Image (cartoon, rainbow, N blue to C red):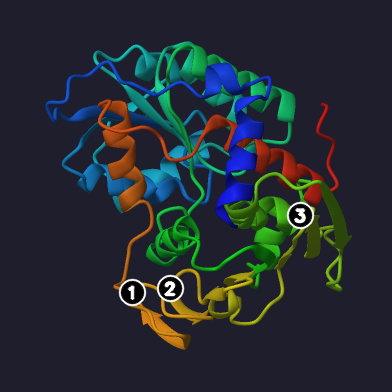
């Protein structure tokens, strides 16, 4: 994206109805002294609930307890290293815990928003796993409440702090790719039959389950699309009703983006990719989970020569940088790099890509 369209997009956000409360800086009540932040977790039903281990290992946090009302899930979790030796509490007990500042919301997807609303109502910062529910009005209400209290709602999109994505943002900030006219992204895997039945509970299918990570990246580059065209298909011979082969086309005035997600791709992790094509260069990240990039430039840019080159990155662990960034924001050391407006635009785009309503 060139500087001028980017400025236009930011001005559009500034004039939006939600911009006033959402554009305020998130400032924690703690001093800049690096005190350990007291944090808890509600839920172990989300596939990414094990990220609590990152917070347990971080010098920035003290984990005070964990909540899981479902007895079966709770018993199963007790034997997992991420939850070993933690204090099990009720939700009311956790939210009333002395000095508690933040809560990780890792429930089943259907309970994410209601649980996050309870945490924000109690005055706590929240790390909310994806996707942000199926009700855009409820999500908007959650963000509005958090904004009024200057609380952070950090979304658990797992590629935000990926080193290749971070470098891509630098290329875009510097204008090295020129004007972006095309993005294509794929995130697929083979989903086992039992997991397919669980995912079929949600009408958005694989786009709802995996596509949110990619929508976060696309909207981060191009902003909210003018139009979303969704193609949803059940391609498997398994009779589970899961929409397992999905495509969304996002239309902009001078660009298009395609986002693809399926439940049947053999070795799908290796082909997960995010490609940004601009008038002055292309940035191709593949695979996303163990990132490498192939970059083409029309002319030398900084230390990068004209033409194609491969860029390697050191191995990274998901959520380590998310947790570190969250600590800095809570302490008031920095602003969030992801605005409420951005997160709301991501969720609206995702629901449209899933052929789900945005007014319920």
Label 3 environment density (alpha carbons within 10 Å; few <14, some 14–19, many ≥20): many
Where residue 202 sits: x, y (%)? 75, 45
- Residue 347 or residue 62, whichever sits in front: 347
Q: In this rendering, which labeled residue sits more in front, label 1 or label 3?
A: 1
**What percent of the width, then of the height, locates residue 263?**
71, 68
- Measured in 3D between alpha carbons, the distance from the residue under mark 3 to the one under mark 2, in whole angstroms, is 26 Å
State the quadrant of the C terminus.
top right
In the structure shown, which secondary structural element does the residue marked by tag 1 occupy? loop
**Residue linked to disc 1:** 313
Image position of 359 (left or right of 264): right
Mark 3: secondary structure: helix
Do labels 2 and 1 touch, CB within 8 Å? yes
Residue at the image point whose x is 85% and y is 36% from the top: 357
- Identify the residue at image location x=40%, y=64%: 167
Q: Residues within 10 Å of mark 2 (few under 14, many from 20)?
A: many
Which label number is shown at residue 205? 3
- Looking at the rendered structure, the secondary structure element under dot 2 is loop
39 over 269 or under it: above or below: above
Q: Mark on residue 291?
A: 2
Whether residue 43 sits left or right of residue 348 in the image: it is left
């Amino acid at each position: 994206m060139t500087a001028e369209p980017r400025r236009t997009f930011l001005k559009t956000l500034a004039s939006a109805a939600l911009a006033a409360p959402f554009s305020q800086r998130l400032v924690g009540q703690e001093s800049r002294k690096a005190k350990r932040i007291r944090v808890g977790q509600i839920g172990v039903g989300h596939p990414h609930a094990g990220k609590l281990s990152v917070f347990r290992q971080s010098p920035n946090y003290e984990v005070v307890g964990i909540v899981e009302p479902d007895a079966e899930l709770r018993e199963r979790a007790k034997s997992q290293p991420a939850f070993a030796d933690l204090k099990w509490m009720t939700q009311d007990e956790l939210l009333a815990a002395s000095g508690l500042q933040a809560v990780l919301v890792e429930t089943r997807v259907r309970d994410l928003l209601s649980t996050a609303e309870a945490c924000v109502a109690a005055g706590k910062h929240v790390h909310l796993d994806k996707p942000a529910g199926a009700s855009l009005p409820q999500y908007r209400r959650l963000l509005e409440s958090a904004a009024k209290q200057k609380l952070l709602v950090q979304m658990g999109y797992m590629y935000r702090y990926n080193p290749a994505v971070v470098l891509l943002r630098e290329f875009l900030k510097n204008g090295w790719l020129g004007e972006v006219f095309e993005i294509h992204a794929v995130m697929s895997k083979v989903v086992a039959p039992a997991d397919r039945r669980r995912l079929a509970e949600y009408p958005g299918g694989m786009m709802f389950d995996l596509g949110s990570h990619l929508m976060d990246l696309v909207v981060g580059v191009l902003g909210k699309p003018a139009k979303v065209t969704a193609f949803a298909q059940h391609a498997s011979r398994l009779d589970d009703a899961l929409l397992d082969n999905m495509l969304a086309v996002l239309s902009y005035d001078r660009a298009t983006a395609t986002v693809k997600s399926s439940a049947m791709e053999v070795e799908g992790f290796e082909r997960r990719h995010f490609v940004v094509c601009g008038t002055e260069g292309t940035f191709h990240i593949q695979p996303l989970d163990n990132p490498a990039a192939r970059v083409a430039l029309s002319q030398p840019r900084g230390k990068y020569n004209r033409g194609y080159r491969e860029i390697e990155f050191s191995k990274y662990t998901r959520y380590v940088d998310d947790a570190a960034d969250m600590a800095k924001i809570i302490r008031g050391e920095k602003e969030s790099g992801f605005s409420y407006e951005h997160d709301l635009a991501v969720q609206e785009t995702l629901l449209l890509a899933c052929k789900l309503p945005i007014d319920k």
